[in-house]
């Protein structure tokens, strides 16, 4: 039994060292997921405080505040990315329009070449 524990301990140590060296995979939450987390923590905070568990309620309240801050930051960065994408799209369409002949010029050319 001791050999198995020792082997399991070394295996766990090797996995932990590998994750520490390479870096553990991180999940990226959207702003909607962060909002849901904030709402859940707020409900847990209210429940704890109503039940008279003030220490637990205060800790959950601090977590709720931090989750709300992360939600607002995430929402702000999403809006910033959307504005930048729209600006890039608009500038590309304006550039493409500048090189396209107008319909007036095109109709003139087609009449000119048809008459020859």
Image (cartoon, helix red, strand yellow):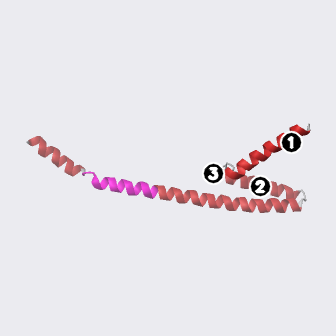
Tell me what residue is drawn at x 37 percent, y 53 percent.
93
**Residue at 84% across / 60% down in the picture?**
57
Judging from the image, what secondary structure is the residue with disc 2 in? helix
Q: In which image quadrant can residue 89 be found?
A: bottom left
Circles 3 and 1: CB distance less than 8 Å? no
Percent x, y of residue 25: 67, 48
- Tell me the quarter of the image containing the N terminus: top right
| Front label number (1 vs 2) | 1
Magenta stretch containing residue 3, yes or no? no
Residue on which the image places disc 2: 41
Mark closest to the chain's N terminus, 2 or 3: 3
Range shown magenta: 86-101
Q: Secondary structure at mark 3?
A: loop
Could you tell me residue 19's position as x and y percent?
71, 49
Q: Residue 30 shows which numbered tag? A: 3
Taking the spot 35% from the left edge, 56% from the top edge, the residue there is: 94
Kindly tell me whether residue 11 is visible in this rendering: yes
Q: Is the magenta region chiefly helix, strand or loop? A: helix
| Foreground pick, 18 / 38 | 18
Mark 1 = which residue? Answer: 6
Give the mark nearer the N terminus: 3 vs 1.
1
Report how far apart the C-alphas of labels 3 and 1 lie in the structure: 41 Å
SS class, disc 1: helix
């Amino acid at each position: 039994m001791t050999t198995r524990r020792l082997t399991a301990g070394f295996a766990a140590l090797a996995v932990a060292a590998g994750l520490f060296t390479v870096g553990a995979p991180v999940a990226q939450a959207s702003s909607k997921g962060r909002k849901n987390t904030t709402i859940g923590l707020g409900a847990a905070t209210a429940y704890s405080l109503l039940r008279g568990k003030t220490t637990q309620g205060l800790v959950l309240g601090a977590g709720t505040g931090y989750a709300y801050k992360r939600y607002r930051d995430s929402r702000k960065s999403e809006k910033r990315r959307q504005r930048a994408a729209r600006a890039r799209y608009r500038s590309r369409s304006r550039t493409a329009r500048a090189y396209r002949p107008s319909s007036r010029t095109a109709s003139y050319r087609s009449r000119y070449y048809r008459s020859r």
